[in-house]
Amino acid sequence: RIAVIDYGSQYTLLLARRIREMGVFCTVASPEEFKVESEIKGVVLSGGPQSVYEEGALGFPKQLEGFPVPIMGICYGMHLLAKKLGGEVRSGALGEYGLTNVSMDNERFRDIPEEIVTWMSHGDEVTSLPAECKVIARSKNGITAGFSNGRDIAFQFHPEVNHTQFGTNLIEDFVFNVCNASRNWKLSAFAERKVEEIKRIVGSSKVVGGLSGGVDSTVAAVLTSKAVGDAFTGIFVNHGLMRKNEDIEVCEALRSLGIKLINVDASEEFFRELKGIDNPEEKRKIIGKTFIKVFEREANKLNASFLLQGTIYSDVIESGAASKNSAKIKSHHNVGGLPDKMNLKLLEPIRELFKDEVRNLGYSLGIEPSLLTRQPFPGPGLGVRIIGEVDSEKARILKEVDSIFMDVLRKSGESEKIWQSFAVLLPVFSVGVKGDKRSYGYVVALRAVNSSEGMTASWHELPHEILREASSRITSGVREVGRVVFDITDKPPATIEWE
Ligand code: XMP
């Protein structure tokens, strides 16, 4: 295993991904949380936003004192390593940002061209090399872009970023030639190991978990079912705010995977709780609380000792619990507060996996592609796509509109190009003519966006004929709707959802 110590670079996870893609297990921990363990064959100190000479800057991990494994320092990590080995780091005159040509030491790197283009992002530089270290890369500006003492190695540029030519080779060189790590990270082996581990942890106890059809919870549930069979029960809480027929489809798909499932139709209870509420945050809170109430009620009947959660690695890292065994989880609308209240032990079988690994594992476990490629869908569902007060009639109307829009996108092949698409029901009525009569109907907004993480998004340029077809099928198919508009706002300044 290779351990990455995270000093706050935006590329830390990418680095871990690159190493796992080489078939080598890699974990990420903060400098405080990092633990020395015998299976660690090498350590990477990541980049970060600080300066090593600043007061309060994160330092070289004390845990590494006397732990004889090779270290690779990247950017800030290079500065830490230089300082630790007795070199000097100072603020540079100019800094280097973006694509920068670097000449490489040909004796050290025989399979890499003499000059490569790299991705730089630094203001500080190594001004005096530690004794016993040798420059192995120099930027065209004359700045030390890499040094090594024969074992430890450091780069000023980011080899993990695609823009750096031969970056993967440089990481491979460290992982295999210097650390002698073995390629034993395979998802199929991971799954087998996890199933055995779940069996051992759970013993003869029972496990319960909330399922929504989302990738993470589904994969976690399949592994658990394989391990303990019917001792696991999945609870699907139907809040009445999913897409049209999605509740039925999701439950069928989960059952076909051999998961024992209880489908609780609590939609009336949700609508009752939401009556008279039009503030979005309040709606979210009510939906979250009601979810927990319903889930708890059902779970209590089952006498379980474990709560299954589909926590994945990015959740673990975001919550700052990367290497702690304590189970701190991101507060998500449908799980927050549950474990404490119910006195259940947490079972998190996929907490070591990245999102794309979860999806790949899903494929290899035979999960239907429709479940694995679903668009992100907000926990509170259509509750935040019905602007203002929510009721069952509005939910019925929006489900019809949304399903027509999705059908048009699917049939035209456009869905595959879109990250997230949906309809929004507005609390606005507009005048129109239907037949010979004056009509007065709802306005609905259609939204389609592209994004990679949901943090930013750009609206998807739907071809006019698709918009025309959606509009005409919606207004003729859903009596209550009189007008259709298309949202052409990016995030920022807007958000993806309307509420
Ligand atoms: P926004 O609207 O914040 O959405 O740009 C970003 C992504 O998050 C989803 N989203 C939610 N997911 N509970 C969720 O589980 C919520 O309350 C919620 N609100 C927004 C949204 O669909 C998009 O993918």
Image (tube, rainbow, N blue to C red):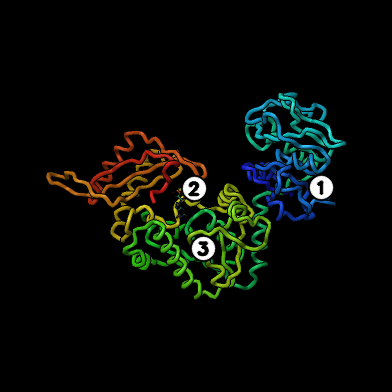
Q: Residues within 10 Å of mark 3 (few under 14, many from 20)?
A: some
Percent across and percent down for residue 453 are 52, 45
Helix, strand or loop for disc 3 = loop
Seen as rendered, the residue at the extreme left is 436
Can you tell which quarter of the image residue 165 is in? top right
Q: Name the residue under label 1.
A: 69
Helix, strand or loop for disc 1 = loop
Q: Looking at the image, can residue 360 be seen?
A: yes
Please say if 329 is above or below 133: below
Q: Please, what is the three-letter code of the amino acid marked with disc 2? A: Thr
Q: Looking at the image, can residue 263 be seen?
A: no
Q: Please, what is the three-letter code of the amino acid marked with disc 1? A: Val
Percent across and percent down for residue 191 are 64, 55
Distance of label 2 from label 3 (alpha carbons)? 23 Å
Q: Which residue is drawn at 39% across and 56% down?
A: 280
Q: Please, what is the three-letter code of the amino acid marked with disc 3? A: Val
Q: Which residue is drawn at 78% across and 43% down?
A: 71
Q: How crowded is mark 2: few (under 14 residues within 10 Å), some or many (20 or more)?
A: few
Q: Residue 196 carries which label?
A: none
Q: Name the residue under label 3.
A: 335
Q: Residues within 10 Å of mark 1 (few under 14, many from 20)?
A: some
| Cβ at disc 2 under 8 Å from ligand 1 | no
Q: Name the residue under label 2.
A: 373
Asked whether 247 or 443 is in front, the reply is 443
Q: Residue at x 79, y 27 (%)?
A: 105
Mark 1, mark 2: which one is toward the viewer? 1
Q: Which residue is drawn at 64% across and 28% down?
A: 99
Percent across and percent down for residue 9 are 64, 43
Asked whether 25 or 139 is in front, the reply is 139
